Image (cartoon, rainbow, N blue to C red):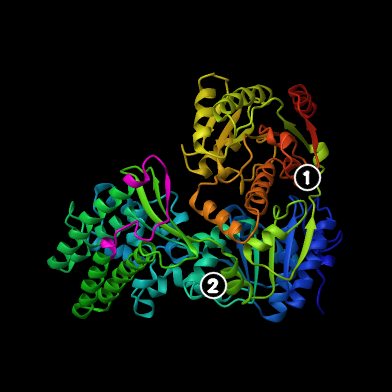
Amino acid sequence: MRVKAEEILKNGGLISQNLSHYEQRSEQIQMAKAVEEGISRKKYLVVEAGTGVGKSLAYLVPFIYWTVQEKKRVVISTYTKTLQEQLIKKDLPFLKKALGIDFHFALALGGENYLCLRKMEGARLYELLDTPGEIRELEKIFSRLPDLKEGLKLELGFEPSSRVWEKICRESEVCLNKRCPFQKRCYYLRAKIKETHSQILVVNHHLFFAHLSSEEKVLPPFNAVVFDEAHNLEEVATSFLGVKVSNYQVNNFLDSLFNPRTHKGFLTRINNLNTEKQVNKIRKFSESFFSNLQKKVGEEKKLRIKEKEFLPCGLYNLFLELSIFLESLKERAKDEEERLEILSYLARCHKIEDNLKMILKQERDDYIYWIEVAPAKRKNKCSLCAAPVDISKELKKRVFNEVKPIILTSATLTIRRNFNYFKERIGLDNAKELYLASPFNYREQVLLYLSPHMPDPWRDSLLYSSRVVEEVEKILYIMKGSTFVLFTSFKMLNQVYEELDKRFLGLNFLKQGDKPRYQLLERFKKGKEMVLFGTNTFWQGVDVPGKALRCVIITKLPFSVPHEPIVEARLEFLKAHNKNPFLCYQLPQAIILLKQGFGRLVRSKEDRGVVAILDPRLRTRDYGKIFLESLPPTRITSTLDEVEEFIRSYL
């Protein structure tokens, strides 16, 4: 007899029997019923579930029963590590106990997250690391081995450098599989065995698309998918179906073959001086090639490539020659391990070669091509990039036409409760739609402050930035900390931060970029009178419940920059298809991101606070109404006196 999710989730059900202070939520039961129907009919379901609906239990309960009774497997794909940890460490263990069902679940991670014991031994034995600092890192990792349970990088307690980690992490190209002397202790193999015995696999969107890109070799077969945090699908799919070649990638690859500073590398170990000369030839050409690219970009961070003959193909031709050299080494390998290592270098060489060819020759007309320059420690990172302009057809072909049922959910998918924008962007047809508002009382919990008399940021950006400083200072004087200040660009963030930092407000400022995100968040949560200045990474996927966060200041509406290469190409694509780019792309994209930023404040029914939006276009432009109508209904004020009164009322 099939158990209905409603019976599990209602008051008196198994959840309430195992969870103190449990409250039945009608929205959660509605979603669970819709998920059950989607499963039984093998349909697509798209759900916007506002904060507090409890969407994870609403899809987990029906899928747990389905996977066990039907002997199926479901993949739960998320965007953030925060949600992954919630599912793996909290929701799934709780449901296993509460439901009394013997089901298995696993967190699936890419192979590069695991230590390879054979490569670790090799790194020490062959002295593969170049500097004393890298050798100390390796010894530190060796000292951690007895404490590792799963062999994951995140278990180390520190972040190893990329150069060290790539020498000791698991790589499919050099894996000896059954012939490996460390097979019985292999961390990755243990993880794969656990995955094949699990009915529920938790992954992130990146790994899901890596699975598609690898001809479906990353994950075991599955019968259904839940995309949670689904508003990020287009972005992740675009990055995975795109290609990139950077000077750092090229240099790291060449150094691993032969490093002229240390005279170490694979080619030195096998005494192949001829190929060392070939590597040095490519290195010199590559340095000149990427230096010229940076000159072309100039002061801009990105430059779109529009002409077919914009870039020479010399670097591609050199990598083609190198691949022929490496191919010839296979026949001279002294054993299977060395042969696999050669194949690994050959695969990396082919990847760079293929990507260079694809970009330099602009092989696909439905892709956008550009050069990107970003500051880095030693020297600027310069990249050649390509990405599909429209991802919808590819997603339809490779995802929606292949798997059913599929559930797509997020707190931010609609514009005025309409799903058309989201569905069109990802190529989703014939889906059942369900809109569920948050059960929280936003009229009591949130005061929305719309700053009066602000200049238009589009017409006078300098004056706007100076007024933002003044307005943020006034709000921080009232709030005394516990505030996120969210920006749409690092430039404005730095301007406002530096100006406010001079004014000695007696508050503790944190700025994105000074430390890793998780460290900034931990300090923000535990400290007093904290103010965090952040850009897009803090607009979403950040959970700070309670009085640690009582105010979110949104300095500017998050419209995408129209001259960004991908954005520019998408706008052109929409124009070519007789669609209004602003109404069909820029506006809805900005609304969804604003909803994400707004959603940082209230994470529970006890949370109270202020959301301040300083951009006057909410009042002065016709589209401002669409933004406001897409947010939860709140009290709105334009006076700071009312803000101060609201804050005092619950302190």
Could you say which is closer to the camera, residue 416 or residue 80? Answer: 416
Say if the magenta span includes residue 185: no
* Image coords of residue 4 (percent x, y): 82, 71
Q: Residues within 10 Å of mark 2 (few under 14, many from 20)?
A: some
Quadrant housing residue 88: bottom right
Q: Which mark is residue 648?
A: none
Using the rendered image of the protein, determine whether residue 142 is visible from the camera's viewpoint. Answer: no
Residue at figure coordinates x 64%, y 50% from the top left: 589
Residue at figure coordinates x 18%, y 64% from the top left: 278
Q: Is residue 550 above or below residue 232?
A: above
* Image coords of residue 30 (percent x, y): 82, 62
* Image coords of residue 193 (percent x, y): 51, 75
Circles 1 and 2 in contact, beta carbons < 8 Å: no
Amino acid bearing label 2: Lys
Amino acid bearing label 1: Glu
Quadrant housing residue 579: bottom right
Bounds of the magenta segment: 295-316
Pick whichever of labels 1 and 2 is earlier in the sequence: 2
Quadrant housing residue 228: bottom right
Q: Which mark is residue 194?
A: 2
Residue at figure coordinates x 52%, y 64% from the top left: 207
Task: Determine whether the residue tagged by mark 2 lies in a helix, strand or loop.
Answer: helix
Q: Residues within 10 Å of mark 1 (few under 14, many from 20)?
A: few
Q: Provide the residue designation for mark 1.
A: 629
Q: Is residue 379 above or below residue 391?
A: above
Of the 4 image quadrants, the one containing the N terminus is bottom right
Of the 4 image quadrants, the one containing the C terminus is top right
* Image coords of residue 175 (percent x, y): 36, 73
- Work out how far the residue at label 1 is from the one at label 2, CA to CA, in angstroms: 46 Å
Q: Quick check: 227 left or right of 131? A: right
Q: Quick check: 372 left or right of 212? A: left
Task: Determine whether the residue tagged by mark 1 lies in a helix, strand or loop.
Answer: helix
